Image: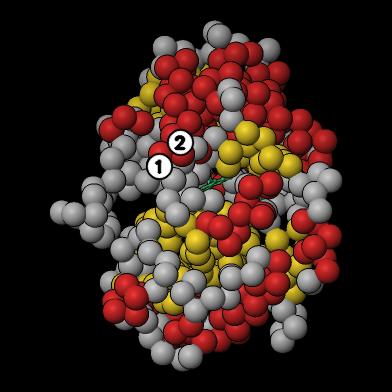
Amino acid sequence: MKYDIIIVGAGPGGIFSAFELTKLNSNLKIAIFEAGNPLEKRKCPIDGVKVKNCIKCPTCAIMNGFGGAGAFSDGKYNITNQFGGSLYEYIGKNEAIDLMKYVDEINLAYGGEGTKLYSTADTKIKKMCLENGLHLLDAQVRHLGTDINYIVLENLYNHLKDKVEFFFRTPVEKVEKNGEGYTVITADGRYDCDKCIISVGRSGSKWMETVCNDLDIPTKSNRVDIGVRVELPAEIFSSLTDELYESKIVYRTAKFEDLVRTFCMNPHGAVVNENTNGIITVNGHSYEDPEKHTENTNFALLVSKHFSEPFKDSNGYGESIARLSNMLGGGVIVQRFGDLTRGRRSNAERISEGYVTPTLAATPGDLSLVIPKRILDGIIEMIYALDKICPGTANDDTLLYGVEVKFYNMEVEIDNNLETRNKGLFVIGDGSGVTHSLSHASASGVYVARYIAESMK
Ligand SMILES: Cc1cc2nc3c(=O)[nH]c(=O)nc-3n(C[C@H](O)[C@H](O)[C@H](O)COP(=O)(O)OP(=O)(O)OC[C@H]3O[C@@H](n4cnc5c(N)ncnc54)[C@H](O)[C@@H]3O)c2cc1C
């Protein structure tokens, strides 16, 4: 089988590169290989009744399949260079913002019309944060919500399905150089192409490492973010979330001068399990549809750990901490803030007596046995700092779920065209280590598609 372009991975990066390629040149023969299922077959078996915890399916319905890791996400598309990745370092700040706006237009045209675009411009919250030692980062955020995000993906799939050949449940095992082009090898066969775009996201991080080893592509890895997911009554954070929906706030701790930041805020949302390479960590999302709203808001508090030589395995470090929580709690651990500050574990009774009802069935326990002291001290400090702008954050009943780990793929050496030193082989999205978000991953897909379409004229 011979294609002009093979795309590995049908997450936002892969989808948007296919979208743009087919738009720019309808004669191109394109195939997409995806380890997971088509969108409608992506069903996580956890139903809270028969299956309460992750049963470690061969491909995770949350992380793999059409739509990638973002399919059941909150669908928050942040238009900013201040977080979500460093794509701008490769393609320039203006280009990066223009591409994120372009992706936003497509999302609106394919089902997202009518969803709200929030912005930090001219907000008084910025001043209030500064007065309390907190820094609000600038961004516009389109909140599609889990429900509308799904509809957009469904529409994009319907648009692409006759223009691109999809191979679902077909993980690519190997990519080999083949003259000027590449051969993509799966359990079912070998497929040749002139250009190959790899967009395998976080779930493909281990596989990406093998590709880089095989094809002699340099990589570097030095960062992991570790923290907890905070859950509290939605009213406590409503002064922020009503105006901004999501606010990225950074705090420098007094004790260690570490930076702690808020991440992935979900007003009226739910806390969920996340399975990365068989390790259960915590995440969150929320629906646009008010009928699916919960009474709680959740967000993560994360601390970045950067390592220097000789240690290289930052993700291994994060995994070990997550494994510890899995060992003690059989999965995610939940603890009341009041129990943590009193140095005692939470138990089912204390959780049920609290005023915050957990949205995730996690194991009550003690996060201080899992999270390194320095990180936990920073998180506790930030909770008290947030309490000054959103009184009630540091209430005893505030729930902390752990651990939340944000793994960063090792950074793959790519040039300003997102091309590796092997000409014709591109690495985009979260799998490149350059992006960490829906908007940046999607933008990288459009960027590479435009470059390839131009070069194949
Ligand atoms: C629960 C959750 C909520 C999130 N919420 C948000 C949010 O609100 N806003 C935001 O900006 N970001 C959010 N994110 C992150 C966001 O989903 C990712 O940044 C984004 O999906 C990255 O896109 P990608 O295309 O690079 O990779 P992915 O979306 O991870 O897609 C990669 C695809 O490649 C496939 N794949 C992997 N290896 C192979 C292989 N060997 N062969 C074939 N296929 C392979 C995978 O199955 C997957 O479908 C969330 C993530 C999760 C898990």
Q: Residue furthest bottom?
A: 343
| Residue 117 percent location from the top left of the image | 67, 35
Q: How far separated are the C-alphas under marks 2 and 1?
A: 6 Å
Residue at 58% in and 67% down: 301
Residue 154: image quadrant is: top left
> Left or right: where does residue 100 sit relative to residue 269?
right
Q: Which mark is residue 371?
A: none
Residue at 18% in and 54% down: 49
User: Image quadrant for the N terminus?
Assistant: top left
Q: Which mark is residue 289?
A: 2
Decide which of 189, 309 is in the foreground and name it: 309
Secondary structure at numbered mark 1? helix
> Please, is residue 162 above or below residue 192 in the view?
above
| Residue 118 percent location from the top left of the image | 69, 40
| Residue 196 percent location from the top left of the image | 53, 31
Q: Residue at label 1? A: 292
Decide which of 78, 349 is in the foreground and name it: 349
On the question of residue 184 being in view, the answer is no
Residue type at the position of mark 2? Asp
> What is the crowding at mark 2: few (fewer than 14 residues within 10 Å), some, or many (at least 20)?
few
Q: Residue furthest left?
A: 50
Ligand 1 within 8 A of label 1's CB? no
Residue type at the position of mark 1? Lys
